Image (tube, helix red, strand yellow):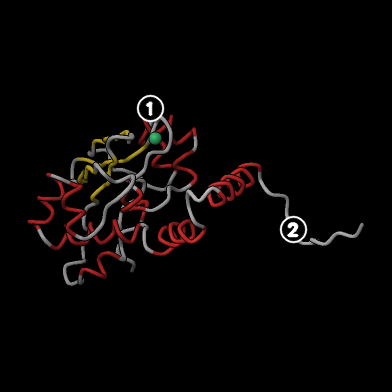
Amino acid sequence: MTDQHANARPVAPAAARVAALEALLVERGVITSDAVDAVVDVFEHEVGPQNGARVVARAWMDPGYRARLLADGTAAIAELGIGGAEGENMRVVENTDDVHNVVVCTLCSCYPWPVLGIPPVWYKSAPYRSRMVREPRAVLAEMGLDVPVRKDIRVWDSSAHVRYLVLPERPPGTDGLAEDALAALVTRDCMIGVAVPVLAP
Ligand code: FE
C-alpha cells in the first residue's frame, strides 16, 4: 500500500487524547467546534502579556491606579477590562529599591492567564520550580538577571487561590514616554520577575 500521507508526522499521545476528547464532546453536543476555536483564538490573539504590560504602564503613569492595584489587584486589573479564568484572585507585588519579587508555582504551573497568557515551558519545569525557592539569586543570575545585593528577593508561590503579577520599577530615562511606549518596555518575563524592563539604547 502506498503512503497517502507522506508528510504526516506521528501525533503525540497527549495531542491524540485531546483530539479524541474534543471529538467526543462535539459528538455528544456538549461543546461545538466553533466554541473550541473561539477559545483558542482568544488565547492566541487577545490574551497575553500585552494585557499585563498595559496594567504596569498605567500604574507607572497614574499613582492613584498604582495604589488601587497594590491594594486590590483583581479589581484594579478589571478596571482595564481584563480578567477571567485563572485570574480571579490577583495580587500585585511591587519591585522597589530594596525588594525584587519573583513568581513561581512550586506545586505545578499556576499562572495569571488573563494578564500573561499561557505560561512559558521553563515556568513549568521542575528545576525552575524547585530551585527558585532555594536559591533565587543564583537562578535569576543564570536567567540573565543580576539582582543587586542590596535588594531582598521575595519569592511568591502561585496557587489555585492566588495568582501574582510583578509590578517592575519604571526604568530611568522614560519620563517623556507615553503609556503605549511604556507598555512596550514591559515583557512577560518582567512581570514574572525573571527580568527587568530596560530602555533600549
Ligand atoms: Fe500550580
Q: 38 and 11: which one is in front?
A: 38
For image coordinates 54% across by 52% down, the residue present is 26
Residue 65 image point, x, y percent: 11, 56
Q: On the picture, is 188 further left or further right than 58?
A: right
Are the residues tagged 1 and 2 within 8 Å (C-beta)?
no
For mark 2, give the secondary structure. Answer: loop
Q: On the picture, is 26 further left or further right than 41?
A: right
Q: 75 and 66: which one is in front?
A: 75
Q: Quadrant location of residue 106?
A: top left
Q: On the picture, is 116 further left or further right than 71?
A: right
For mark 1, give the secondary structure. Answer: helix
Q: Which image quarter holds the C terminus? A: bottom left
What's the amino acid at mark 2? Ala
What's the amino acid at mark 1? Arg
Residue 74 image point, x, y percent: 20, 47
Q: Quadrant location of residue 13?
A: top right
Q: Earlier in the sequence, mark 1 or mark 2?
A: 2
Q: What label does residue 90 carry, if any?
A: none
How far apart are the two marked residues, 1 and 2, measured between alpha carbons?
44 Å
How many discs mark residues in the rendered view?
2
Residue named by callout 2: 8
Q: 156 and 149: which one is in front?
A: 156
* Image: 70 above or below 57: above
Q: Quadrant location of residue 97?
A: top left
Dot 2 crowding, Cα within 10 Å, few <14, some 14–19, many 20+: few
Residue 19 image point, x, y percent: 60, 49
Dot 1 crowding, Cα within 10 Å, few <14, some 14–19, many 20+: few
Q: Outermost residue toward the front?
A: 28
Residue named by callout 1: 134
The quarter of the rendering in which ligand 1 is drawn is top left
